[in-house]
Image: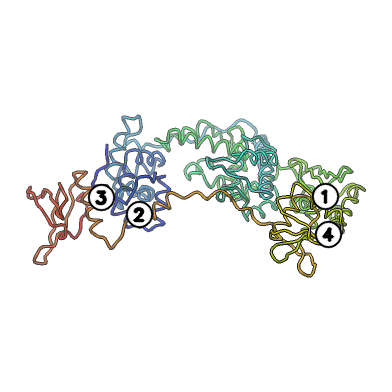
């Protein structure tokens, strides 16, 4: 059934009064399809269309639906423009609710029925067993996301236009996190909800908050992830889940959510399934049974959640075995500050109940470039070693220190240069086929390029040369790796674009256009309107008309009070409002 034109007129006038921020929030909340909308009249009719109303009602919880059906003011229904400012549902909304019983959905009166039991019985499993099982998942998820963030920090991941991460990057991230490709998506979603990863234009990258998170200890990292997950839950559902530990969520939760969102259908079932899966992955629940830490999470108590899970997390260690094959192995997870320090000079190869790292020339070059020297690297490694400093590792540190900055990059007029005291190494760079794109050419005792020094520096770094940036005096200076610039154009926000179009269409200097659109809408809907008219003598009067035609600068319509046809000059019409 088409929406009442009277409702559309009233809603259009209301939409016209919204500021841009309120209008944008509405468009996003109602997930409005923006195609074909020219002005607020089109938008009002789109919002009151049967499909749009049904979609909005499917996402309302039962208390809001009951208030809407009984015309009780509700922030939710008013914000979503399902009712007017006084809480009265628009005609299209009222008609949709009246059709519900025929669809097997609750009638307006039945919406006030009490809720069923939200949760099942208390599980017979020992709570300590549940907490231990949940903690295993919690620690695994936290460790995987830690490695995922590290991999994104090393290099952003490309997002495809059709959605999803490009396969080469997805494989790289999955390998770093030691998960399957199917398991990668939920982990990225958790990292995004926790504010650790962000999709910027066409790439996934890390946020500044990820640095502090990665340096925290495992229980606090987990609590941050879990609290962020719980924060996205619908408040009614979160309140139910916070009931008490050991309760079986399972079918009781499904039945409750089905009651809470009677028209939710597949959308709500998918959401419940996704949230339940995330709860299992995070260790908020195990086998559908809430854990002690999980209850603290859904209650929003991060400190209590971290304390509860800490009891079942592996205890961090402060020492490791340094081995002759250049690997470093800890018998447990290395303490967070030591892990962060070690990662500056070694590549993490395994994360979990034990840590595994590997030192190589590139990782030591990274440490040296970051400000370390041979002495500081030796000192740190010796401080955590249970086996001293193996000779191969000591030799590699000395060799890397000797070679560090053997190649220098600097600025020259029109580009940059590469120089080295090792002539053989310089000749190797000159003929290296892997870096021919740099356009290096010999000029005296150095190589020159038209590229900026920073570009040349990082290209040679990636090619594994011991390179450093120097100033005009030959002093080594630090350089930040430039952030990768996405080659994919940022996606246009269709809702923001619509807000801009609506603002342009509603030109206050053309009042006649607004009146004509109001009258045209009333004519098409055969809806009565109140018309304020300026009389020849200067007085004003108001008619309640059902407009029948508009043309030649005149409005024709039937006067509802006297049942006669009136023809009014459009130039005399001062205002038009809905007669509903």
Q: Nearer the viewer, mark 4 or mark 3?
A: 4
Q: Is residue 212 visible?
A: yes
Element marked by disc 1: helix
Residue topped by disc 1 = 361
How far across and how far down the image is residue 560, in percent? 11, 48
Residue 315 numbered tag: none
Q: Residue furthest bottom?
A: 473
Determine whether label 3 and label 2 are within 8 Å by CB: no
User: Tag 4 or tag 2, which sits nearer the N-term?
Assistant: 4
- Distance, label 3 to label 2, CA atoms, is 16 Å
At 41% from the left and 41% from the top, the residue drawn is 59
Disc 3: which residue? 9
Can you identify the residue that label 4 sits on?
420
**Earlier-in-chain disc, 1 versus 4:** 1
Q: Quadrant of the N terminus?
A: top left
Residue 277: x %, y % from top left: 57, 36
Q: Are marks 1 and 4 in contact (CB under 8 Å)?
A: no
Badge 1: few (under 14), some or many (20 or more) residues near its Cα, within 10 Å?
many
Q: Which mark is residue 502?
A: 2
Q: How much space separates mark 1 and mark 4, taking CA atoms? A: 19 Å
C-alpha gap between disc 2 and disc 4: 62 Å
**1 or 3: tag closer to the N-terminus:** 3
Q: For numbered disc 4, what is the local secondary structure? A: strand
In the rendered image, residue 519, in percent from the top left (x then y), is placed at 20, 51
Compared with 197, 252 (above or below) is: above
Q: Which SS class for mark 2?
A: helix
Mark nearest the camera among 1 and 4 is 4
Query: Which mark is first along the chain, 2 or 1?
Result: 1
Q: Of marks 4 and 3, which one's residue comes earlier in the chain?
A: 3
């Amino acid at each position: 059934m088409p929406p009442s034109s009277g409702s559309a007129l009233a809603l259009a006038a209301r939409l016209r009064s919204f500021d841009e921020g309120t209008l944008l929030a509405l468009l996003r909340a109602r997930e409005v399809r923006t195609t074909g909308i020219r002005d607020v009249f089109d938008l009002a009719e789109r919002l009151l269309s049967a499909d749009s109303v049904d979609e909005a009602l499917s996402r309302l919880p039962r208390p809001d639906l009951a208030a809407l059906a009984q015309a009780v003011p509700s922030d939710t229904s008013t914000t979503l423009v399902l009712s007017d400012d006084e809480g009265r549902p628009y005609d299209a909304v009222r008609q949709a609710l009246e059709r519900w019983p025929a669809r097997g959905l609750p009638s307006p009166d039945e919406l006030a029925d009490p809720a069923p039991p939200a949760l099942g019985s208390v599980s017979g499993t020992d709570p300590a067993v549940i907490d231990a099982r949940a903690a295993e998942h919690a620690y695994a998820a936290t460790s995987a996301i830690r490695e995922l963030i590290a991999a994104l920090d090393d290099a952003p991941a490309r997002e495809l236009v059709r959605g999803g991460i490009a396969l080469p990057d997805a494989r790289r991230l999955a390998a770093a996190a030691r998960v399957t490709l199917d398991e990668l998506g939920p982990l990225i979603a958790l990292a995004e909800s926790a504010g650790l990863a962000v999709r910027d234009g066409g790439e996934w990258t890390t946020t500044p908050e990820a640095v502090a998170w990665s340096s925290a200890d495992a229980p606090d990292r987990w609590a941050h992830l879990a609290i962020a997950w719980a924060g996205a839950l619908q408040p009614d559902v979160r309140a139910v889940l916070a009931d008490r530990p050991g309760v079986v969520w399972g079918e009781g939760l499904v039945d409750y959510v089905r009651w809470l969102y009677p028209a939710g259908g597949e959308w709500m079932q998918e959401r419940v399934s996704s949230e339940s899966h995330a709860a299992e992955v995070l260790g908020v629940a195990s086998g559908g049974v809430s854990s002690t830490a999980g209850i603290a999470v859904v209650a929003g108590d991060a400190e209590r959640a971290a304390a509860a899970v800490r009891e079942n997390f592996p205890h961090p260690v402060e020492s490791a075995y340094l081995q002759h094959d250049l690997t470093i192995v800890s018998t447990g997870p290395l303490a967070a500050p030591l892990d962060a320090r070690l990662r500056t000079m070694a590549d993490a190869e395994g994360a979990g109940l034990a840590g595994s790292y590997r030192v190589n020339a590139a990782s030591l070059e990274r440490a040296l470039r970051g400000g370390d020297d041979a002495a500081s690297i030796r000192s740190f490694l010796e401080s955590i070693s249970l086996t001293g400093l193996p000779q191969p590792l000591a030799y590699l540190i000395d060799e890397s220190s000797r070679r560090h900055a053997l190649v220098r990059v600097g600025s020259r007029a029109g580009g940059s240069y590469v120089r080295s005291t090792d002539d053989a190494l310089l000749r190797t760079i000159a003929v290296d086929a892997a870096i021919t794109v740099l356009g290096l050419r010999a000029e005296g005792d150095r190589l020159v390029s038209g590229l900026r020094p920073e570009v040349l520096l990082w290209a040679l770094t990636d090619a594994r040369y011991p390179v450093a940036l120097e100033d005009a005096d030959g002093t080594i200076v630090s350089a930040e790796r430039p952030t990768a610039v996405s080659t994919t154009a940022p996606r246009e926000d269709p809702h923001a674009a619509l807000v801009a179009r609506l603002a342009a269409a509603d030109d206050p200097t053309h009042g006649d256009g607004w009146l004509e659109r109001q009258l045209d809408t009333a004519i098409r809907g055969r809806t009565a309107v109140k018309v304020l008219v300026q009389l020849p003598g200067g007085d004003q009067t108001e008619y309640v008309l059902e407009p029948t035609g508009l043309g030649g600068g005149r409005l024709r319509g039937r006067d509802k009070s006297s049942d006669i046809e009136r023809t009014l000059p459009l130039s005399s019409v001062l205002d038009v409002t809905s007669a509903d």
